[in-house]
Image (spheres, rainbow, N blue to C red):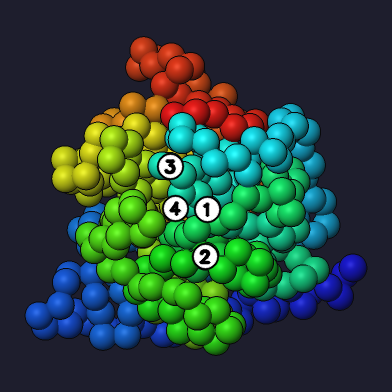
Amino acid sequence: MRSARRVATLVLAIVLLAAGCLGVGGPVPGEPAHHRARGFANTNPAYERPGFWTRWSFFASRVWSTTVGPRTASFPLEAVDAGALRGNHGAPMVTWVGHSTLLVRLEGVTFLTDPQWSDRASPLGFAGPRRVTPPGVAFEALPPIHFVVISHDHYDHLDLPTVKRLAATHRPRFLVPLGMKAWFTENDIAEVEEVDWWERRPVHGLTVTCVPVQHWSQRSPWDLDRRLWSGWVVAGRDRRFFFAGDTAHYDVFQKVGAQLGPFDLAAVAIGAYRPPRIMRSSHTTPEEALRIFADVRGRRFVAIHWGTLDLADEPLDEPPRRLMAEAQRLGLDGDSVWVMKHGETRSW
């Protein structure tokens, strides 16, 4: 165990050190503001990435804590009606599988957001964030999946075993931000389409739009910010769905709401916000998540990115408590702000 901890810490130190020595270069003349010569950048003038030693100390401490004394949780799971999931009903529905994975049905089309069914979200099989709650839907119980949206390349959002299994069993189209198609191709997944911010694609009669968020990307020591990060909008004839992926709050969401809203359902992350020195530039607190909800002109809010993987320092059960306290302060009721059980399905 002690040697495994040392190896994990060493690997993460090398990753962070190498990342700190690499860069994406400057702006590209004639290209959008977020494009760089060797990757991508956030465009919020207030964005500031945490310093190298701040990041290193945090990740090293997280590897240590999740290996030596992993936390546990006991969140309720909803019994899943596999027959109902597979039925081709016309009513829009959403099921929270866990973390940022939602199973969504709209106009008879079924899609997934950031699918993650693995036990860990890590490049290391023996260390890194581990599930504290199992998937709310067994992979075998999934209905046919028509397409999948991926917000960015972090291991808790882009899980190789899961996407390979989806590609083999469901053959969906994967819609991904710029720079990510090569990764899928290297892993023998061909049905992939890259999309830039504000670009849209027709998919099975729905319109899917890639939208800006504030985050970052990295899967190895050599690819910091080489792939873009995004949120997604899925619009049908009379329903609109917004998926924020991972992001900090900034004024771009007012533009998303004005151009593509209002949204009947908005899925926004409420977890992984402590310590602020690490998280504030790329994640939202529960209170900030509700600011995004207001900015995009949402009608119903579904909380994601909490209670599934042990990613940060806040108590595992704190995010929904803070969310509902803020919702009450804002005069929002339980019909408009949803804290779902793992496996729970609701109509929207």
Q: Residues within 10 Å of mark 3 (few under 14, many from 20)?
A: many
Tag shown at residue 172: 2
Residue placed furthest toward the right: 1
Pointer 3 with pointer 1, Cβ within 8 A: no
Tell me residue 28's x, y (percent).
17, 82
Residue type marked 3:
Leu
Q: Which residue is mark 4?
A: 246
Quadrant containing the N terminus in the rendered view = bottom right
Depth-wise, is mark 2 or mark 4 nearer the camera?
A: 2
Q: Which callout, 1 or 4, points to the residue nearer the camera? A: 1
Whether label 2 touches label 1, CB < 8 Å: yes
Q: Secondary structure at mark 1?
A: strand
User: How far apart, in angstroms, are the residues tagged by discs 1 and 4?
Assistant: 16 Å
Q: CA distance from mark 3 to mark 4?
A: 23 Å
Q: Amino acid at mark 1?
A: Leu
First in sequence, mark 3 or 4: give its number. 3
The residue labelled by disc 1 is 112
Q: Neighbour class for label 4 at 10 Å: few (<14), some, many (≥20)?
A: many
Left or right: 258 with respect to 205?
left
Alpha-carbon neighbours of circle 1 within 10 Å: few (<14), some, or many (≥20)? many
Considering only vertical position in the picture, is 225 above or below 296? below
Asked if residue 266 lies left or right of residue 128, the reply is left
Return the disc, 2 or 4, that comes first in the chain's sequence.
2
Q: Which residue is mark 3?
A: 106
- The circle on residue 58 is none
Mark 2 element type: loop
Mark 2 → mark 4, Cα distance in angstroms = 23 Å
Q: Which percent across, then down, holds residue 10?
A: 70, 78
332 with respect to 11 (left or right): left
- The residue at the point 50 percent across, 49 percent down is 110
